[in-house]
């Protein structure tokens, strides 16, 4: 294809997106669009899969049968999200095995928040409330993103995430209204998860490298700083309502702005975790790689069995 | 307690699902593939759902304000009456699937009979659970066939698992005092009558899987009397952690 032809296709492509048309797997797309989408969607899928680990950590110790069932269902939903996001990625011509390989080798990233440890039951509440809450803010705009398979996956993901978020908040309500020990557990969890949740919305706009192009493709519709502000404005009243204190002495309602002012985020900590040196980066990767390696003989056997079955069928047909 | 036999009988059913569900819950996020991970978590969820129905009913029978969670999480090890089979560890996927298969075949046969119970609550729980457990059995049987047939390595791993776990199967067909009393009243299932059919089904699926039942005639028992393997204490340590550390609180 000549350069001019490509330019022409690109112009048509951008015009389709501007008209809010969906791009589908079989449509022509610029290579950069494909790559960017594989990167973002797989990062999202990996986050779901790695995100199963900190919560999975409490399944066997959930305090009641009701909570145990809800937690199992939640972690299972995350596996489901991973599954359809990987499938959506596969429509762009990359296999799930390749995507895993990128995760296991450290080439692909996942959300840094999952590199923090879950040390008490209240963390199950805080993750649902704050982490899923921040995820929703990130993800709701993606229900209208330009790539069809991603947009459709996100509609389903967001519905479930919003259920998880309410479930997490409900755990916090129960703790906050419980015994002093329970309330302290809830406050401690909020203290530990608040700042990492703010970091989850990404580096400040000045530092964010992908934003401009992503905006054009509707992979991103608001800047990181705007999303963060939205998250804070939404979450502070929820904390107030259940008598918990946001661990930020600089947090203050700004009447003029109509939103909260807040303190400085420790970006050194953010980059430390992103670069692989958070409290649980090693543990999370070991768990994923370990599961994959321990499962190799199972996957090989399943393939071998399927092939044998096929051969038997063919023999019978002869 | 007025209905002590019925209460103990219900625990005899539910404790199996509780401990097996707990074992499967350990695996969430660590499965050999995303699909098997989801499926095992799903089975765990089904089992805990059933457990809740049984314990809620047992709590009602006890009639002394105890809750499903008290029954699930605040007994002593010797008071749990699950069979030894379900407390065996997730050594690898071969053990996990074999344990599941050996239990599922029993579980489905059991529920088919429990459906006919004169106790309407139990027959209703059984009817609902049967749909779930039929799926469990199909899932675990398919994996027995897949891994038995798959590769030399997978066949060997599966045979090892059968060789180790088979000795826990006979206990499934032992009757407790509560069992005998409940069978007499038309409420309980006569497990001794399930044994032949169980062996038929297991043998046929293992044959298809090119696996064999070990020849040893020695079996292990004790779970139904509350005498467990050494694994049990650790399972309960996790299961009971919150209830023991923070007593008398609501979650």
Image (spheres, grey):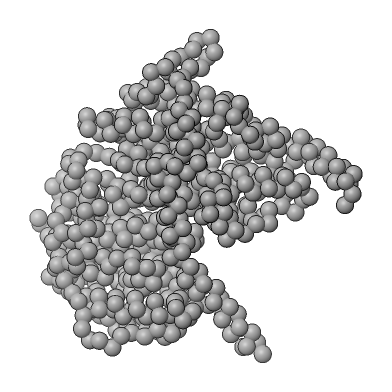
**Above or below for B131 versus A158:** below
Which of B193/A47 is in front?
Answer: A47
Query: Which residue lies most toward the top here?
Result: A256
Looking at the figure, which quarter contains the C terminus of chain B?
A: top left
Whole-percent x and y of residue B120? 27, 61
The x, y position of residue B179, in whole percent, is 17, 70
Q: Going 47% across and 71% down the picture, which residue do you hit? A: A297
Residue B46 seen: no
Q: At 64% from the left edge and 49% from the top edge, which residue is drawn?
A: A38
In the rendered view, tell whether residue A195 sits above or below residue A123: above
Q: Position of residue A278 (x, y in %)?
A: 42, 41
- Residue at x 19% of width, y 67% of height: B229
Q: Is residue A19 left or right of residue A200?
A: right
Residue A246, by quadrant, is: top left
- Hey, which residue is sitting farthest left in the picture? B1
* Residue B126, quarter of picture: bottom left
């Amino acid at each position: 294809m000549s350069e001019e032809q490509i330019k022409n296709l690109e112009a048509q492509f951008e015009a389709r997106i501007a008209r809010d048309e969906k791009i589908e797997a079989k449509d022509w797309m610029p290579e950069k669009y494909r790559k960017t989408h594989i990167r973002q969607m797989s990062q999202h899928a990996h986050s779901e899969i790695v995100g199963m680990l900190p919560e999975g950590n409490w399944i066997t110790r959930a305090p009641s049968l009701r909570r145990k069932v809800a937690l199992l269902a939640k972690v299972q939903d995350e596996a489901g999200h991973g599954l359809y996001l990987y499938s959506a990625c596969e429509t762009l011509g990359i296999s799930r095995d390749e995507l895993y390989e990128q995760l296991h080798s450290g080439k692909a990233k996942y959300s840094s928040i999952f590199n923090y440890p879950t040390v008490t039951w209240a963390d199950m509440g805080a993750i649902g409330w704050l982490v899923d809450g921040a995820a929703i803010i990130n993800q709701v705009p993606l229900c209208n993103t330009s790539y069809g398979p991603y947009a459709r996956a996100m509609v389903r993901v967001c519905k479930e995430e919003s259920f998880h978020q309410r479930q997490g908040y409900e755990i916090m309500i129960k703790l906050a209204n419980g015994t002093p020990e329970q309330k302290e557990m809830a406050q401690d969890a909020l203290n530990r998860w608040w700042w990492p949740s703010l970091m989850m919305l990404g580096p400040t706009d000045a530092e964010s490298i992908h934003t401009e192009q992503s905006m054009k493709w509707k992979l991103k519709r608001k800047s990181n700083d705007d999303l963060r502000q939205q998250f804070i404005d939404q979450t502070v009243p929820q904390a107030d309502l259940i008598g918990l204190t946001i661990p930020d002495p600089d947090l203050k309602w700004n009447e003029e702005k109509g939103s909260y002012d807040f303190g400085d985020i420790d970006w050194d900590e953010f980059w430390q975790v992103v670069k692989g040196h958070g409290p649980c980066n090693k543990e999370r990767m070991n768990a994923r790689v370990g599961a994959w390696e321990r499962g190799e003989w199972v996957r090989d056997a399943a393939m071998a069995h399927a092939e044998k079955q096929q051969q038997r069928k063919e023999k019978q047909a002869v | 307690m007025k209905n002590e036999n019925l209460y103990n009988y219900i625990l005899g059913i539910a404790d199996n699902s509780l401990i097996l569900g707990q074992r499967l819950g350990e695996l969430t996020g660590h499965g050999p593939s995303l699909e098997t991970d989801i499926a095992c978590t799903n089975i765990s969820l089904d089992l805990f759902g059933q457990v809740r129905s049984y314990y809620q009913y047992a709590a009602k029978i006890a009639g002394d304000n105890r809750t499903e969670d008290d029954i699930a999480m605040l007994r002593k090890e010797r008071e749990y009456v699950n069979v030894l089979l379900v407390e065996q560890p997730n050594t690898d996927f071969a053990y996990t699937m074999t344990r599941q298969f050996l239990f599922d075949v029993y579980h489905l046969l059991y529920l088919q009979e429990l459906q006919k119970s004169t106790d309407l609550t139990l027959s209703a729980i059984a009817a609902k659970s049967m749909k779930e457990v039929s799926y469990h059995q199909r899932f675990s049987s398919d994996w027995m066939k897949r891994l038995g047939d798959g590769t030399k390595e997978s066949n060997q791993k599966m045979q090892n698992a059968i060789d180790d776990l088979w000795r826990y199967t006979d206990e499934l067909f032992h009757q407790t005092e509560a069992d005998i009393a409940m069978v007499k009243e038309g409420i309980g299932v006569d497990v001794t009558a399930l044994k032949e059919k169980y062996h038929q089904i297991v043998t046929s699926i293992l044959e298809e899987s090119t696996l064999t039942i070990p020849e040893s005639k020695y079996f292990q028992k004790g779970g139904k009397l509350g005498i467990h393997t050494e694994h049990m204490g650790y399972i309960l340590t996790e299961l009971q952690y919150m209830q023991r550390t923070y007593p008398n609180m609501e979650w």
